[in-house]
Amino acid sequence: MFSNFFIFAFRLLRRDMLHSIINTIGLSTGMACCIIIMMYLQNELTFDRYHQNADHIYRVGIKITMGDQSEGYAQSSWSIGKRLKDEYAEIKDYARIEPFSGVLFEYREKVFYEDQIALADPSIFNIFSFMFIYGDPATCLKEPGNLVLTKTLARKYFGDQNPIGKIIKLGNKYECDVTAVVEDMPPNSHMRLNAFVAMASLSVVAPKVDFDNLPLMEADCYTFLLVDEDFSLNNFLKKFESFRKKFIVEEEKRYRQKYDPIFLKLADIHYGPDLRFDYPKGNKAYVYAFFTIGIFILFLACINYINLATARALVRAREIGIKKILGADRRHLVFQLLAESLIATMIALLIAVVLVELIMAAPFFNQLLNGSLQPDLLNNPYFLYGILMLWLFIGLFSGLYPALYFSSILPVKALCGTLTYARSEYLIRRSLVTFQFVVSIAVAAFTLFMNVQIDYMRNRNMGFKKENVLSIKLHDDANFDKIPGILKELRHQPDIISLTTAHTRPGRAWTNLISVEGKNGMQEHNFYRFLVNYNFLETLGIELQQGRDFDENRPSDKDKAVIVNEKFVEYMGWENPIGKRLTKGLPDKPGFSGEVIGVVKNFNFYSLHYDIEPLWLSLQHKVGGSVIVRFKSERRAQVIDILKENWKQIHPGYPFVYTFLDREFDRFYDADRKQNQLINIFSFMCIVISCLGLLGLTSFNTSRRIKEVAIRKIYGASATRIILMLFKEILHVMLLASILAIPLALGFFHMWVRNFAYRSNINYLIFFTTAATALIIAFLTAGYHCIRVAKANPVDTLRHE
Amino acid sequence: MLQTKNLSKIFTTHEVETTALNNVNFEVQEGEFVAVMGPSGCGKSTLLHIAGMLDNPTNGEYYFMGEEVSGYSERKRARLRKGNIGFVFQSFNLIDELTVFENIELPLLYLGVLAKDRNKRVDDILEQLELVPRKNHFPQQISGGQQQRVAVARALIANPRVILADEPTGNLDSSHGDEVMKLLVDLNENGTTVIMVTHSPAYADYANRVIHLFDGHIVTENLKDKYNKHMQPLSEVTG
């Protein structure tokens, strides 16, 4: 019996090729989108879970409270791991990780800057799961200078050779021996490190520092704890009071801050709280958006199947009628129709899997997803299970209505040709297609809103000039003595408008704990700080609001001049900011002490995801950080050549690497842009699937009205008039869909835009544009059927009646 | 075998009522060959549909093998139909996606006959109706006469007690029509009850009895001595 179902279903698909192709394209496109979304969600929701101990690893961060101001940090002190392990039996082990970027790696003629190079305790290989290709996890990070490379980095420097025992020079001076090679960390790791340097190397670099006893208040590295299997965080926090008394109370008094630890489970970090110095976080808004779009696409694909299947009711009614007369009961027919839908879905699924593999292999798509999705579907049991569920769901869900509908057809009606389409059935189909266009128009409008927001962020006046500015990083062993002279010479280059140096600048800022003169004496705050050189404001086009800029002719500026932004003034409630005092350092160990000489207008020194915060600027004592150069836009290549030439004197042996400030800022929106492109693709898919649905509806509608059209034509209606009459129905569907899409698109957009401190205005014209485009696409899609029916010879139609 | 008492069928569309059958009383004995004749729209097909339990009457009683079925649900009627009634239609009503063999096999499939038995029975009937060379063809690949032979084979395969044929020769030329009629006569001679709707007096002549319908009523019922080819008015027969 089952084999009969299958043979019959295949013949049916073959016979009605056009509908079968429309159906298969719709289903396979929808399923391919769903599979990619499933992969995306699986990747997003399983961050760091691949570690065997994932449920027993906690990261220790800290929350520092000053007065009523609290700030959370992802990092913690060098000493907390050991102290916790010593105090509590349930802490089995700890590992500290301090990552660095822009580390110079040198092996023979290969010299590159490398990012995400971490100083790490040897215990990381005990706590985390790494796949070792070469080397021994127990000993590879024990000795100073031990270096563990990931596969990609090992291949970069040593090709396919075994690199164990090879020496790589780091930072132009530290010789490290490669002791192991591990597989790259998977893309779903919150921190993706490229190499590990033994923590023991600190004893060579900083022999005098007792890292195990550094203050807990100073957060410098990431600390991970491996806890007992029956560890309960709540119980542990209850016991934490003793630790507080022993180690924290004294420090709190000294620093005049309150200290609280933040224990975060490894797998919760990716979607955890926003903490300073943390790695980029996952955005739940995208997870929800993709999940919703996935569900929508799933329904859109099902709706197509339902509409196309039931649109063929009159054609199939005879067959169903005959089968009933020959003894088929309803159960048989339901089975047969469900088997048909399962077969159609299975064919679509196979095509979808091939599509997914092809899509994932396309460089554009791979880049879009950071290569983070592995299309190895057949070797992933979760996926096989997921795909099986997807097949069953779509197969059964979309087959159910046609199955119940067809099996209820009365044989006598089917055979006498008295079966007609009820108006209510048409309304159901029309509602389903309207729903498809509501979703498509909403998603398309949402992507356009996203485009507007991203353009707005890219083009918004940041309050400083980031165009035609490049930045070159200076390293610790640069020829600092020569730099001021070289910079002075460069300033006279006609192609260079202005240049300066700075440790921190827009895009890279740090915070410092400072005491600021407030209404009631000195107040402590943790504010952003730029450590800069003369001409900083000029080079970046930052405008002064009052007071003056740093002055080379006033030597005292180096020690005590401070410039603040308007936000700082507003925050402190100063009426006259000039002359206000500001000190940095501990009460018992004061450092910098200065006073405000000027106020700059507010400017955004980070992406527009964040609001402007209070900022203060002071002068570098020694040139360092980065050289920042503003140049004439048309002379970019020449300026780069000049700087490259001078670079040899500043940093002999270091590769010349520079970044453009505008591109660096642009990269802040990379994730948003990528997600936008992805949603763009899915929105396109929604439209394609919906158009297939419309094609089905039109085919249904025209076959329903074929007799009416013939009669109208006999009584004088022109083909154009008939086409307009049929288009009017589509117009109604599209108008209704466009209106219903407005709240949905706005809902999506508001959910997404919450992540931005600065938001573009909603341009309602977008709805009009989207709806008009959708209408044109709809007319083009439906045109063929409408024109065919309108041009048909009425005599032919009525002869068949 | 079949008996109707005051059988009526009224079709209602919106506010318009059309009476297709009006107080029809007739009976068919087992082994009879009855032809139903009358002009278009007189209710012939409706009578056949009710007799075949494809539809229910609006009023009256209908006894099929002694069972009153006029109020039966579609499900109950389907169960009773299965294996007891075979249908032959004017437009053959073969399923285009199934081969000749599969079309004939269909009723056995729904009766739950095992594959081995099914194959044997279909092969036998194919041979009997000289359709073996066409067994793997699809309906659209064979002639109209052959299609109707397939339809008859399909109606016969489950050994039904009654064959209901709705203008079985209507779409055929005379040579193919004769062929199909010969099949029905043979069947009847072997004991199967046949009720046939036809427009053709010549084909009606093959039947033992001819019922004439007009405007939903039975107007005459002729019992025929098929050996003498002599028609008698019903009143004379019943005396």
Image (cartoon, rainbow, N blue to C red):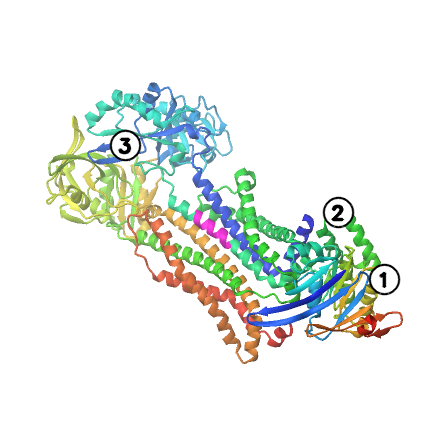
- Would residue A293 be counted in the magenta stretch? yes
Region in magenta = A291-300
Tell me the element at label 3: strand
The answer to which of marks 1 and 2 sits earlier in the sequence is 2
Asked if residue A208 can be seen in this view, the reply is: no
Pointer 2 indicates a residue of which chain? B
Pointer 1 indicates a residue of which chain? B
Same-subunit check for callouts 1 and 3: no
The label nearer to you, 1 versus 2, is 1
- Would residue A705 be counted in the magenta stretch? no
Residue for badge 2:
B114
Residue B234: image x %, image y %?
A: 80, 72
Residue for badge 1:
B189
Mark 1: few/some/many CA within 10 Å (<14, 14-19, 20+)? few
Residue for badge 3:
A63
Mark 3: few/some/many CA within 10 Å (<14, 14-19, 20+)? many
In the image, residue A742 above or below residue A678: below
For marks 1 and 2, give the CA distance. Answer: 29 Å
